[in-house]
Every structure is written in structure tokens, then in C-alpha cells.
Image (tube, grey):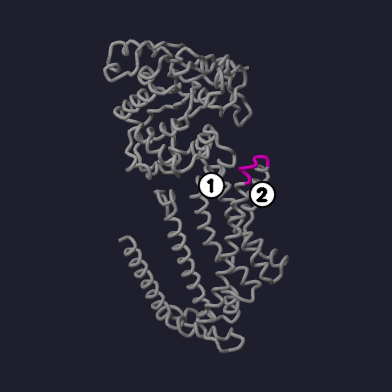
Amino acid sequence: MADETLLELKDVTANYKSTTGMESCALSSVSIKLKRHEIIAVVGGSGSGKSTLLGILSGIKTISAGQIETFGERPRVAMMFQNNPLFPWMNVEDNLTYSLKLQAINYASRKKAAQEMCELVGINPNAYLSKFPRELSGGEQRRVALGMCLLHNADLLLLDEPSTGLDDANKWRFQELLQKIWIDRPFSVVVVTHDIEEAIMLGARVIGLKDGRVSGIIDVPLSYPRTQETRFSKEVSVLRQQASSLSFDSPDKKQKINECR
Amino acid sequence: MNAVKRVISFILATALVLLAWELIAHKVANPKLFPTPRYVFTESINSFAQFDEIGSATGLSVLLQHTSQTLLRIIIGTTLGSLLGLAYAVAGFYWSSIRPISNVFALLFRSIPLLVLMPLFVFWFGGSPVGIYTWLTFASFTVVATGAIDAIANVDLSHIQKAQILCASRTQITSQIILPAIAPEVISAYKALMGFSWAFSLGAEFLVARSGLGYLASYAYMYANMGQLLLIMVLYGLLGLLTFAMLHVIFSRTGWLAQNPLKQ
């Protein structure tokens, strides 16, 4: 299964139209192949096109040129947003089971699923199911958001800067949790991050984006689960240096506009 | 404990206002222009008996009867107007093709001072109750529709995208994302409306009605009865406070709104 392709982006270009009507290029001729049950990490600086890539993969952003090829049925997608990963007006239970509610699953089944998911993501259901997002810490919110995505039963999980705003302990805990769940479940993950270490700890490949183009791809030959020992190993240190070469320069907008034309 | 503090604060504030009123009426102002509280709450109340055509009712019962007329108009007018205003704003979200037109109308309504439109309603509907109800409904519609359109424009796009990615339909996004997301701002608009609605009703009743507090105020003004005018003002103040207290109780028990740290 690991070698089966889930989807492939071929020479994908995506433009944004500004309020003045000027088109700017967010992604330019990007080609990425995503395998089933694979985690890839996408790194890049602000404005490098990371979020646009997630938008395209999630279906909320259309492409201007190129092709998205899916193999078999179109994959079910779930996405964890960087800001406001949960609906603030819903409690934890309703957030977790929102996808099931959309599928008209009955209340008893949703309740049971919420309790099981809470346990899976390491949250005490009795204490947390009735809480609202603003009563949770950043780490707890991310874990509930992960549970929300998992209950959607997605083939492809998109994570937008999953550890932004978290301290190291919560960041590492989230990464370990994600790996633990992913190992047992057949979904693929695309993690967008500006954190090189996170990219190496999660991704089987690290893809660099710069000015909307792929600036390089690094294979990460480390087995899962990657633990704290892995994090402080020599291999990770070397990989981190390699990945740092994937540029983090801020984009030159003028150049991007010209390249798109 | 908070409730006890609030009651004590209210009693203290009321006592202070009454004391200041009594002092100003006695020491500073002309009692004919600024009667004392004692006069207002006794003589002025009794003087409303003159509005009873048969002549058997007390001043207090006449006052209560007219107050209930005003309340009924406000409740019906604001409820109908608010529901229509909310529906109008949500329809603009649901059918994106009509959004530009609905937004232009909202901008237009917002730009015209509502009280300026009142004489038009008087001409269109005369002094009939329909005119007052239509005016209150229209004014409420305008306040809530413009508030709700702003609120929809401010909804965090990521909430809508989250639902879209999870395959929510447009109807589900409208009912499960947009409506709860805009609830705090719509409730704020509704609270503001409840404040304006007393002024809206006063204006309408002042001009055309044969009953209601505005009607009583117009007579008090005509005969320069300052006691009656002050009493009506106090009554408006109390009714406004009561309305806000009721809204506070209702909205502080509704799900996530109760969790909102910025709730009033």
C-alpha cells in the first residue's frame, strides 16, 4: 500500500487576483506525488505558497493551470486549520462529531464515537466533552481538532502549521500522538510548517517551497515512530542542516508576478 | 453574589437619583418646571385618570393600559422586523447572486436617519395602528439587517472552509456555521434595537396614535404638564432596564453565548 499513489499534482499553477485586479502567482508549476499512507512535510517561508497548496489539496482553492490526478476514488480530505481549528460555538463533543452530524449519523452513535475519539487523542471524555474551545489549552484544541479530522474518516489529512503557538512539550506530544494514530490507520498526511525540526520528525519527505516553486525535496530515511531519542540523534541533526538549504527567503512579489505571465 | 451586588448597586443608584432629583426640585429649579418626585409619583399618576373616557378608572390603571399598548407594539414590531432583517441578511449569504443588491439596500437604509422616514409612514398609513406596526417593523428590520450583514461579512472564512471540506451543504453551512457565528453580533444589534425601539415607538405614537405612552406624552407636552412628562420618562427608563435585564437572562443561558468572555 505504501507505494500506491493517492494523488499527483502535475505542473500546478495557482494565481490570486488582488483588489486592484492584478494577478499574482501563489504556486507556479508545482509537481508533487503523494503516496497512500505517507506523511509529507512542506516547508517554506511566509508567502512561499504553502497555504495555497493546502487550499488546492483540500478543494477550496482552484488551480489556474496544470492537473490534479487522483488514483481510484477522489480521496476524502480533512484539514486542521492553523487559526481557529475548532468551531467556537460548539462544545468538544459537537466539534468532534460535526462530520458525523453532516452524514446524519444518529446521536447515540455520535456520542459513542466522541468518547472513543477523546480517548484516542488523549483527552478525558468525562471532563472535556461538554467544554467549549475557549476553555481548552492550545494543545488540547489541536488534539480535539485532530480527532475531528479523524472522525471524518479521511484518506488525506492536511495540517496547517499544527504546532504554531504551542510550547515544546505540547508540540512534541502532538507529533507523537499523530504518528501513533497514523501508524495504525491508512491515511496520508500533508503537514505544512515553517518548523524544520517538525518537518523532519513527521515527514517521510520534506518538500521545500520558495516563491511558489518547489525548491527541493529531501527524503527522511527514519523509521516511525520517531521518538525523543530520534529528535536528538545525529541523523536528525544532519537532516536539519540539509533541510535548511530549502530556502526561507520571503518572496519577491514583483518577480512572482512576472513569472506568472 | 454578583446578583446581590447588582441589586444593591441598583438600589443605591436609584436612591441617589431620587435624592438629587428632590434636591434640584426644591433648591434649584422652578417646581412647576421640575416637580418633586413625591408630586410626580402621586399627583401626576392620578392626573392620568382624565384620559379615561368613562371616568371610572384610576390614573394608575390608565397609565398601565397605555403602557401595555406601547409594549405590545414594540414586541410585535421588533420581533417581526428582526426576523425579517435576519432572514434578509442570511438570504444574501445563501444566494450569492442577490448579495450585491441586498448589500446596496442595507447601505442605503443605514445612510438614511430612520426618524426622518417616520413622517412618510404617517402619510402612507395615516393614524392607523397598521402604520405604527409597519413603521416599527421597518425600523427594526433596518437595524437588524444591517447588523447581520456586517456580522456575516466578519465571519472567519476558515469556519466556512472547515465545513466545506467536511462536505457540508450550503444549507448546512448557513444553519450550522453562519447563524451561530453571527449570533453575538446579531444579539448586540438586537440589544441596540431594543434601546432604539422606545424612541421609535415614542415618535410614532407622538405623531399619530390614539393610545400608548407616546400619545400620553404628546398631551402632557401640549398642556405643559411637566409631572406627567417626567413620569413617562421614568417609565421609559424602567421599561428599558427591564428589557435589558430580560435579554441578559435569556442570552446568558444560551450555549456558547454564555461562554463568550465579551458577553454583556
Above or below A127: residue B164: above
Judge whether residue B94 is colored magenta: yes
Above or below B1: residue A51: above
Can you tell which quarter of the image residue A185 is in? top left
Q: Which chain carries label 1?
A: B
Instruction: Classify 10 Å Cα crowding around label 2: few (below 14), some (14-19), many (20 and above).
Output: some
User: What residue lies at 44% left-to-right and 50% top-to-bottom?
Assistant: B257
Q: Which chain carries label 2?
A: B
Quarter of the figure with the C terminus of chain A: top right
Return the mark for residue B76.
Answer: none
Let me know if residue B31 appears in the view.
yes
Query: Magenta span: helix, strand or loop, mainly?
Result: helix
Q: Which residue lies furthest to the right in this view?
A: B124
Return the mark for residue B105.
Answer: 2
Image position, residue B159 (x, y; %): 50, 37
Judge whether residue B96 is colored magenta: yes
Among the two numbered marks 1 and 2 on one chain, the one whose residue lies closer to the N terminus:
2
Instruction: Classify 10 Å Cα crowding around label 1: few (below 14), some (14-19), many (20 and above).
Output: some
- Mark 1: which secondary structure? helix
Residue designated by label 1: B179
Image position, residue A229 (x, y; %): 26, 17
Q: Do the residues labelled 1 and 2 touch (CB within 8 Å)?
A: no
C-alpha separation, residue under disc 1 versus residue under disc 2: 21 Å
Task: State the residue in front, A214 or A113.
Answer: A113
User: What residue lies at 40% left-to-right and 49% top-to-bottom?
Assistant: B259
The type of residue carrying mark 2 is Phe
Above or below B239: residue B59: below
Question: Viewer-nearest of labels 1 and 2?
Answer: 1
For the record, the magenta segment spans: B91-97
Can you tell which quarter of the image residue A137 is in? top left
The type of residue carrying mark 1 is Leu
